[in-house]
Amino acid sequence: MLKSIFIIFLFQLIGESIQKYFEITIPGPVIGLILLLFTFILLKRSTSIFIKKTKEEISSTSTYITSYLSLLFVPIGVGVVMHLSYLEKNYIEVLGVIFFSTIFTIGFTAVLMEKINIYLKKNARKK
């Protein structure tokens, strides 16, 4: 578990470094997770037992970590309370962003799931 946490944090560090160096507006941890995803995709057909075991450890560790995901929202809640005066001044804009981003996310997820279902059905027919 320690090795897989190290790898996850290493990719987060790489993502943070890329974000700071290129001054990208995407958060560093998101860049790191995208890089980790691409690494998984590139190593998908690897026959190395070490790589397969490491991928399985990372998957189980990430599943374990996400069970405690709600704890990560505590600092966000504190931050919202600290900036309550900003929210009072700009509540219409904030509510608009929340509403439209929620609608966009639901729509994007629906389209993505439909594409994944079509892809999986095509692959199931080939086998």
Image (spheres, rainbow, N blue to C red):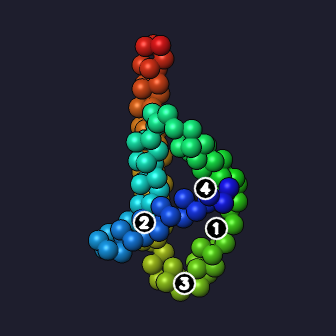
Residues tagged 3 and 1 counted as in contact (Cβ below 8 A)? no
In the picture, residue 111 is in which quadrant?
A: top left
Is residue 94 shown to the viewer in this render?
yes
Measure the alpha-carbon separation of dots 4 and 3: 36 Å
Q: Earlier in the sequence, mark 4 or mark 3?
A: 4
Q: Amino acid at mark 3?
A: His
Q: Which mark is residue 84?
A: none
- Residue 14, x across and y down, in percent: 42, 66
Q: Earlier in the sequence, mark 3 or mark 2?
A: 2
Considering depth in this image, is 81 or 42 the residue closer to the camera?
Answer: 42
Is residue 30 shown to the viewer in this render?
no
Is residue 37 depicted above or below 96 in this figure?
above
Residue under pointer 3 = 83
Residues tagged 3 and 2 counted as in contact (Cβ below 8 A)? no
Residue under pointer 4 = 4
In the visual, does 18 lie left or right of 106? Answer: left
- Residue 91, x across and y down, in percent: 48, 75
Measure the alpha-carbon separation of dots 1 and 2: 21 Å
Q: Amino acid at mark 2?
A: Ile
Residue under pointer 1 = 72
Element class at badge 1: helix
Q: Residue at x 65, y 52 (%)?
A: 61
Q: Amino acid at mark 1?
A: Leu
Residues tagged 1 and 2 counted as in contact (Cβ below 8 A)? no
Is residue 11 depicted above or below 93 in this figure?
above
Q: Residue at x 47, y 13 (%)?
A: 127
Q: Residue furthest left?
A: 22
Measure the alpha-carbon separation of dots 3 and 1: 18 Å
Q: Residues within 10 Å of mark 4 (few under 14, many from 20)?
A: some
